[in-house]
Image (cartoon, rainbow, N blue to C red):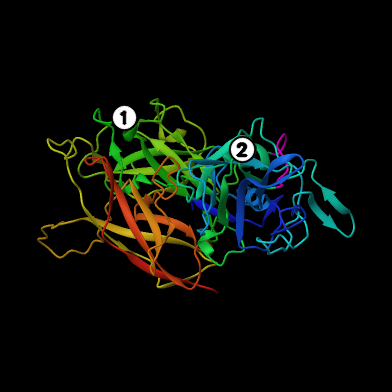
Amino acid sequence: MAIKRYYATADTTITNAYKTDLSTRGTGSNMGASDILEAFVLYGQASSSSGLSAEKSRILIKFPTADMSSDRTAGTVAASGSVSWYLKIYNAPHSQNVPDNMYLSINPVTTDWKEGRGLDMETYSYSGSANWLAAKSSSASGVTTWTNNGGDWTEVGKYGQITASFGTGTEDIEIDISSIVEDGWLKSSGGITNYGLMIKFPEHGETAISSSYTKRFFSRESQFFYRRPVIEARWNSTVKDDRSNFYISSSLASSENINNLYLYNYVRGQLKTIPSAELVTVALYSGSAGPDATPLQIKNSSDTSVYVVTASEGSTGIYKAQIMYTGSVKTTESLYDVWLLGSDPGGASSSDRREQIHTGSAIDPKRFDDGHAWTADPTPQYIMSPVNMRSTYSINEKARFRFFARKRNWNPTIYSKAIATLDSEIIESGSYRIFRVADGFDAIPYGTGSTAHTRMSYDSSGSFFDIDLSMLEPGYSYGVQLAYYNGSLGGWVEMPYEFKFRVEEP
């Protein structure tokens, strides 16, 4: 999985706006149970002996960073530096004026606060915390006031100033807040305690002698499942297992000469780290019916000639080795990867080999210069079908969807009975989206940008992706649509197929 969503655990709006009498401010009001969050600046609605003044409202939101931390420890979320954290808050349409060409600042809150259960957004008649003056209150500790009226937050330092911009005033917020999450909330030392975020008009907007009217968002109390505030972790978890896509090195390619081979260490049905102080390494052999006695000289990802390549454990029990092979293979032979516990033997002698723990299946290598150098741009087209998709899933499931692919208009000539299983075409640049069938809403849009969080993996069985189905609202049917990058066109091509399933409560 390369997407994990963390929904808000508390949110509210605080304000110092005038009540309907235009003389008393609603600084004690709370809107914690409202389905709307609101930020505005209203100037000059009422005057006093000190002249005209501004009325303001600000948004407070909390997210479960304890869950983020535990998921990282469990390996569910990628390590720091490999994941981006996006804040997503959705616009709530309304009939009042909206500010255009506006900005909202997003800052970490530095004082703990209580959500409250107030509903009133019109007369500000519900008193409770959090509000403009108080962060929280309890029968045991009394009232905790803000250090500064209107909330406490930090604007400077290593967390930076994060600003969301709006052209028409009706846009959603979808912005990278990794600096706050990683350098602040999740940092083991030197970070900041998670008291949530404050979303407000920037200082120059709040002090301007003009109104910015109102910007509204759906809160966590909204009836609309996909409109609730969320922080989305995005990372590239693509597995590119080249066992069926192994290329012999060529001067036509550079980094593409590197082949990824994987070892999956399953113990009683579960992936487990190999309990050994020795390195996990892999050697390459050729042979007609199995590996010969002498290993082949290969190159590692640093282009250094070796006899074994050290593998790295990317996640629990999954080891990856990166290999380049510059030699040749007889047409009657295949390549075999032999996995070992031990360091580089420093030679080709079979007596130097360490403990063998696994021998992979036969690898039939391809060549870049064999049908891959073209005099005109190719325009590949594919037909794909699901291999293991069920009609119904539970929201408690984490599922792997697999797909078989072949080139369109593929028409092999068969002179004898075909008994072998057809190999899937390897599509290296596949991506997916998931949409709600009823209205076409993108539950998980394509993520083909820098985070590449919807890129599909592949292995010898074809393309696949993993998904946490709790991200989908139960009681609806969903469709999967696939796309691939066409280098000839310089863009993504969406396939005209939709594969449907339904998500239900357990």
Q: Is residue 434 above or below residue 71?
A: below
- Image point 34% across, 64% down: which residue? 387
Give the class, few, some or many, for how many residues have Cα within 10 Å of label 1's Cα (few <14, many ≥20).
few
- Image point 52% across, 46% down: which residue? 99
Tell me if 316 is positioned left or right of 287 in this view: right
Query: Is residue 244 one of those drawn in magenta?
Result: no
Evaluate whether residue 273 shows in this view: no
- Image point 53% across, 64% down: which residue? 225
Question: Disc 2 on helix, strand or loop?
Answer: loop
Tell me if 10 is positioned left or right of 92 in this view: right
Mark identifier at residue 130 = none
Give the class, few, some or many, for how many residues have Cα within 10 Å of label 2's Cα (few <14, many ≥20).
some
- Image point 33% across, 46% down: which residue? 429
Q: Between 225 and 391, which is closer to the camera in this rendering? A: 225
Q: Amino acid at mark 2?
A: Ile
Q: Which residue is mark 1?
A: 254
Measured in 3D between alpha carbons, the distance from the residue under mark 2 to the one under mark 1, in whole angstroms, is 60 Å
Q: Which residue is mark 2?
A: 209
| Location of the C terminus (image quadrant) | bottom right
Q: What secondary structure is the stretch in magenta mostly built from?
A: loop
Question: Disc 1 on helix, strand or loop?
Answer: loop
Q: Between 117 and 294, which is closer to the camera in this rendering? A: 117
Q: Amino acid at mark 1?
A: Ser
Evaluate whether residue 263 shows in this view: yes
Point out residue 176 in the picture as x, y percentages from the top left corner: 53, 41
Segment tinted magenta in the rendering: 188-195
Q: Quadrant of residue 286?
A: top left
Point out residue 276 in the picture as x, y percentages from the top left corner: 59, 43
